[in-house]
Amino acid sequence: MTNNIVFLRKNKKQNMGSVKKAFLFFAVILFAVSPFLVKASESHTAEISTHAEEPKTQREEIDEYIDHHLQDDHYFSLYTDKKEGKTYGFPLPVIIIDGGVKVFMSSEFDFGKNTVEKDGQFYKLYHGKIYKTDATGTLNYDEHHHPTNAKALDLSITKNVVGLILATVLLFWGFIGLAKTYKKGANNLPKGAGRVLEPLVLYVRDEMAVPNIGHRYREFMPYLLSVFFLILVLNLLGLTPLGFNVTGNISVTICLAIFTFLFVNIKANKDYWKHIFWMPGVPVPFKFVLAPIEVLGMFTKPFSLMVRLFANITAGHTVIMGLIAIVYVLQQQLTLGGSIGVSMLLTTFLMVIEILVAFLQAFIFTMLSSLFIGMAVEEHNEAHH
């Protein structure tokens, strides 16, 4: 396999020249999924809840739509037809652990209008969360209008989970094809999506793992490749009409940051711990001052990884949705064609920026992870102190 990679690097121009074609092929696969989902969703329409509320302003409607897009959901909603009063999409499985495992489809909630009874217990869906309630669906609120009802342990297949599953399938499909190419011999070039993956694999190895970790880089390559391509694919899926926002979910970025934290501290050598708790070459009184700061730094590093990825992706999606909303805001001042043109121009420009951000955030998370791991496994030379 090593000889094969060396040979492929000699053919770098040929590989990179085919990246564009393979990327377009990869993108077509992603967008091809959308029509099938739309078609399947037509048999699972549900009317929008029509509660007696005060009419919402245009800004409130836009803010609510953006918030709904950014949040996770028990439904895979594709679009809403306000004239017909229907939302097109399909329900996802609800899995609750509450005195046993309860499995049913989210369509039973009817977008929060119905109370679902399972094994003598009642559940209500409210703002994306499932609460335990009574037969009438009563919810109790605090002074901030937040429900105080107990929540069941929710392990449902939500929209973000679907996004993770889809990203996993795409990664397995791409890397299995790349692995089959390597098995055929050193003179075979990757085909299809493999022509995109192979240069990126080499880039992660040569520009991140080797410079930051050193001779032990092979030990951490599986994790670095996994986190790089997972974030990259999830970010790109978030730019498709499927509307995923997986890396904009704080729970996902927390999990990724925790894995980096575990790799850093489990694989760390004695020099790493010595520099944290009893830094060599520093006067003893200062060692007691620096130790708490270094311990705090152990946790601020993964925290920065978590916040950086979450904040950048969330901000990007918010701005894109806001620019798309211009078509509705300006429809009174401009013609429909003019407002659409302004919105499309700004959205297209920002979409190009978001594609760059998708790659950049995957690069930054992986680069910093490799840097933190390298600092933990580095063998320090005491002669420098």
Image: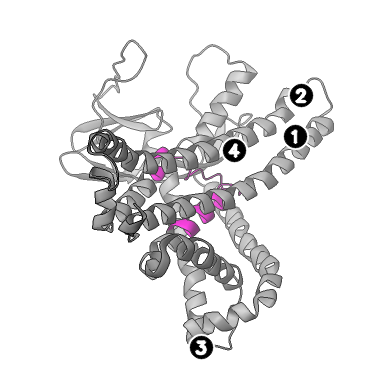
- Which numbered disc, 2 or 3, marks the residue that appears first in the sequence? 3
Instruction: Note whether 318 is above or below 22 in the view shown.
Output: above
* Magenta segment boundaries in residue numbering: 227-253
| Label 1–label 2 contact, CB within 8 A | yes
Instruction: Note whether 350 is above or below 264 in the view shown.
Output: above
Disc 3 and disc 4: Cα gap in Å?
42 Å
Question: Total marks drawn?
Answer: 4
Which of the two discs, 1 and 4, sits closer to the camera? 4
| Label 1–label 3 contact, CB within 8 A | no
Name the disc covering residue 330, or none: 2
Q: Secondary structure at mark 1?
A: helix
Q: Quadrant of residue 112?
A: top left
Viewer-side residue, 102 vs 328: 328
- Which numbered disc, 1 or 2, marks the residue that appears first in the sequence? 2
Name the disc covering residue 184, or none: 3
- Which numbered disc, 2 or 4, marks the residue that appears first in the sequence? 4
Specify the amino acid type for callout 1.
Ser
Q: Is residue 223 left or right of residue 149?
A: right
